[in-house]
Amino acid sequence: NKVSVMDLNQLIDSGCLNLSAMEDAYARYQQNPENVDPSWRTLFSQLDAAGKTQRVKRLESSCTEVAPNHEDGRIRHLIDAYRTYGHLSAKVNPITIQVSEEPYQLGLEVLGFSEQELTQNFPTCGLFRKKQAPLRDIINVLKSTYSNKIGVEYMGLGNPTLEKWLQERIEPTHFRPELSVDQKKLILHYLNKSELFESFLHLKYVGQKRFSLEGAETLIPMLATIFDIGAPLGIDEYVLGMAHRGRLNVLSNILDKSYAEIFSEFDEGYVPISVEGSGDVKYHKGFYSEVKTVHGQDIKLTLTPNPSHLEAVDGVVEGQVYARQVSLGDDKNKVKVLPLLIHGDAAISGQGIVYEVMQFCNLEGYATGGTIHLVINNQIGFTTVPKDGRSTTYCTDIARIFGAPVFHVNAEDPEGCIYATKLAVQLRQKFHCDVFIDLNCYRKYGHNEGDEPAYTQPLEYQQIRQKITIREIYRESLIQQGVLEKSVMEALEMEFKNNLQEALNLKNLSSPKAVQYEEEHLFASKNDDPFAHMLTGVPKQQLQEVGERLCYIPEGFTAHPKLVSLLKDRLTMVKEGHEAKPIDWGMGELLAYGTLLWTGIQVRLSGQDSCRGTFSHRHAMLMDQVKEQAYIPLQHLKEGQGRFDVFNSPLSEYAVLGFELGYSIANPKALVIWEAQFGDFCNTAQVIIDQFIAAGEQKWAQKSGLTLFL
């Protein structure tokens, strides 16, 4: 069969290609090309012709640098198999009912070995300090690294540098962290806060919906780790988007929203309309805070409010982050502001908006430098089990489409979760890619606290009800290690419970904080009249000056002949007036943008085919007909003008409109416009219109100056 160079990596990753056979064939080919089948001869000649720099990386390491011993090639194949498929047998599920079988990709015979060879020595290829070891020992090391309590998907993503970077960090440690006593105490501290907060609410507000985090409490120390690791790497701000589960816990124990304020919201009738908005539930609301990391660095945290449409907030978060990056002058490096999306397993695999938002990851005008995705994988969606909710192995399989590594972790292994979280932040900052952390956990109660899950999942909930909590598991582990005495832990827990009770007693005296950025970012003060008459005209001379700049063609720029004629007509419109040539819609629109930019106001316009305009009316971007290089006149009006951006968006309405809404929220002084290609195309973005644009100010006191072109 004919195999192209481009197909080779895919064949290796699929397990369909026998590397040992390939190495043998390549060795024979080097001796004499006539010694191999014509199909191999064609492939190897293509590789040689392409030159070393363009060869497939895997083939180069496994075939062209084969050690004198043939066994080295077999072991390399074995190691790559565990790097690629080891996650399939990792022990990441805390509520496994059936023992999973070893994946066929890791079978001895499939990898070219026999049972008799387990005691024989083979090259270790750098896995050990010693150069040789029994095959059984090599396999055990690979299993302890890639098939233990952390599974990782990172091979075959088209980024050999990332692969090598991860291998250098996880293989020497066998993917197990080495934490100090203080770090272990800190993990327990956050687990205490996470679990005791939930149990206190459960006791004091019986039957009320709160979408508890119980069964996934490890999320709290993981978030704290993201912020603590990110600060030294240059991250100053985070924008979070998440659905209901665990939201109150994140608000209180991560964003420092006071317990008293949260307790007040549980009291019927206590709705501080002036700050929090009205008519929405407490687990939809957002929050802004400035906090210190464990190491004392100041960071800004924004939790974006969201409706019940679980993933609708994703694009809004990305837009907010991009706007902040632009405001901070970080839209090139993208290291200061990080988007953090917390998903549910059913939502991330079931809702197409996730794909639409991820499509932004490498697009100019939308890319935010990588998003960290944390999936609270409680292995159920309301009452729907995974086999009924997705067709893929993992809920995170969308990550592979975009070359994003995935860490699968066990919530009952807090130290492993923290280790994977640290690597995720470092990966994002170094490679500017999306990174996924699949937190395998469970849901202690039903979809909400008033729901009975045993109606539909009786066996699963028999197991869950017998479980010891994550905090208790980790606490006992630390006691056995001698890290802390039991009496000390119990005293700390009692102190925290007393603090919660004190907050409950003071609940009605709390002073809520606004769900916005800093005061200077607010769109308008509460006393402004939105219907006040505004003078929007500009002097004729200014219109003419702007118009002339809009019609200017740079020296050496080859414009399309029809556009040369169009620009001459537009110049006549502004220089000679209505009688000579009336100003048409396209020119009027550009003059409106130009006069705003002239006064320093930022303008951003995006939509499908917005640069030219669907009806060929705008031509905000001119394209050189020889060099095919773009020139945007509105970016070249004068020194000190406002920033102008125009982008052809991906073929998406839902995600793009959410993005532009988020941008307008985080930068309310800019004119932000989303343009529907055709008027009815806004139908597929109706969730954003209904839930965010039309209702956001009433529900969340969230103002937006977004303009829609329909």
Image: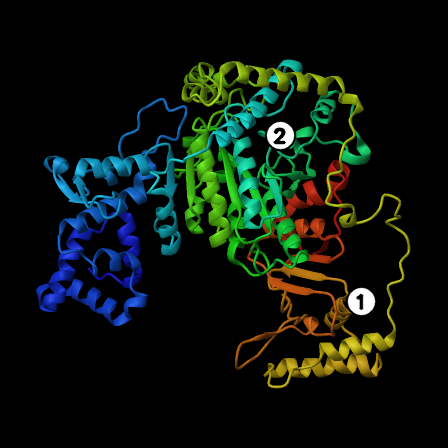
Q: Which residue is the site of mark 1?
A: 599
Residue drawn at x 69%, y 65% is 644
Image coordinates of residue 549 in percent, x first then y, are: 73, 78
Q: In which quarter of the image is residue 122?
A: top left
Local SS, label 1: loop
Circle nearer the N terminus (2, 1): 2
Image coordinates of residue 197 in percent, x first then y, are: 61, 22
Local SS, label 2: helix
**The C terminus, quarter of image:** bottom right
Residue drawn at x 85%, y 43% is 526
Question: Which one is in front, 395 or 33?
Answer: 33
Residue 703 in view in this figure: yes
Residue drawn at x 55%, y 45% is 230
For label 2, count other residues whose C-alpha is less than 10 Å away and answer few (under 14), some (14-19) or many (20+).
many
- Which circle marks residue 532 in the picture? none
Picture layout, residue 239 above or below residue 5: above
Image coordinates of residue 273 in percent, x first then y, are: 80, 32
**The N terminus, quarter of image:** bottom left
Picture layout, residue 573 above or below residue 280: below
Residue placed furthest toward the bottom: 556
Q: Which residue is the site of mark 2?
A: 253
Instruction: Give the amino acid at mark 1.
Output: Thr
Q: Quadrant of residue 130?
A: top left
For label 1, count other residues whose C-alpha is less than 10 Å away and answer few (under 14), some (14-19) or many (20+).
few
Q: How is the image coloured?
A: rainbow
Left or right, 657 with respect to 638, comes to: left
Q: For marks 2 and 1, give the CA distance.
A: 44 Å
Instruction: Give the amino acid at mark 2.
Output: Asn
Question: Which one is in front, 75 or 97?
Answer: 75
Residue 212 in view in this figure: no
Image coordinates of residue 281 in percent, x first then y, are: 69, 29
Question: Which one is in front, 85 or 422?
Answer: 422
